[in-house]
Image (cartoon, rainbow, N blue to C red):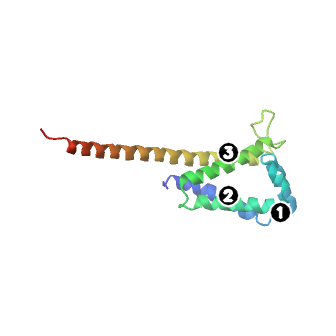
Amino acid sequence: MRISHVPLRLTTGAFILNSGLAKRGLDAESAAGMQGMATAVVPKVGNMPPEQFGKLLSTGEMALGAALLLPIVSPLKAGLALTAFSSGLLQMYRKTPGMTEADGIRPTQAGTGIAKDVWMLGAGLALVLDALIDDTKGAAKSTKKSLKKQAKAAKKALPVG
C-alpha cells in the first residue's frame, strides 16, 4: 500500500465503519425506511424482513470499513469495493423521489445528505486507478527485465568469431 492511500483509506474506512456500527441496533421502522430506498436500486431487498435488511446493511458497512482500514487488503480490492458501495448509494440517490432537482443530478435539500457520498466514489476510483497503474508499471518493468536477460543469454550463446 502506498503512503498516499492512507488518507483515503483512513477517512472512508472510519466513516463507513462508524456508519455500520451505528446501524447495529436499528429499529424495524428505521430499517424499513432504508430498505425502501434501497429497493429502488436492488428490488430483491424488498423481499426480506426489515430487521434482516438492517443487520445485512450494518454488517456490510462494517466489513467494508474494516477492509479499507486494514493494509493487508489490496488497494485494488478495497477500491473496487468502495466504488461499488458508493455507486449503489448514488444510484439510490438518483432513483429516490425528492432527492434531485428536475435535472435528475443536482441534489435537493433532502438529497444533499446522500449526494455528498460522491466523494467516496472519487476515493474508490482513485484507489482502483492507482492500483491499475502500479500493476501496469510493474508488468512493464518485469517485461523489460526479462527482455534484458534474454538478450544477455542470446549474446552469450552466439559464437565468437
Dot 1 surroundings within 10 Å: few (below 14), some, or many (20 or more)? some
Left or right: 160 with respect to 77? left
Residue on which the image places disc 2 = 16
Q: Secondary structure at mark 1?
A: helix
Q: Quadrant of the C terminus?
A: top left
Q: Name which quarter of the figure residue 102 lies in.
A: top right
> Observer-nearest residue: 58 or 45?
45
Q: Position of residue 1 (x, y in %)?
A: 49, 56
Residue on which the image places disc 1 = 51
Q: Alpha-carbon distance for marks 3 and 1?
A: 27 Å
> Observer-nearest residue: 77 or 21?
77
Q: Alpha-carbon distance for marks 3 and 2?
A: 14 Å
> Observer-nearest residue: 8 or 1?
1
Are the residues flagged by discs 3 and 1 in contact, CB closer than 8 Å? Answer: no
Dot 2 surroundings within 10 Å: few (below 14), some, or many (20 or more)? many
Q: Position of residue 149 (x, y in %)?
A: 29, 46
Q: Name which quarter of the figure residue 26 lies in.
A: bottom right
Q: Residue at x 80, y 36 (%)?
A: 101
| Labels 3, 1: front one | 1
* Residue 118 circle label: 3
* Residue type, numbered disc 1: Glu
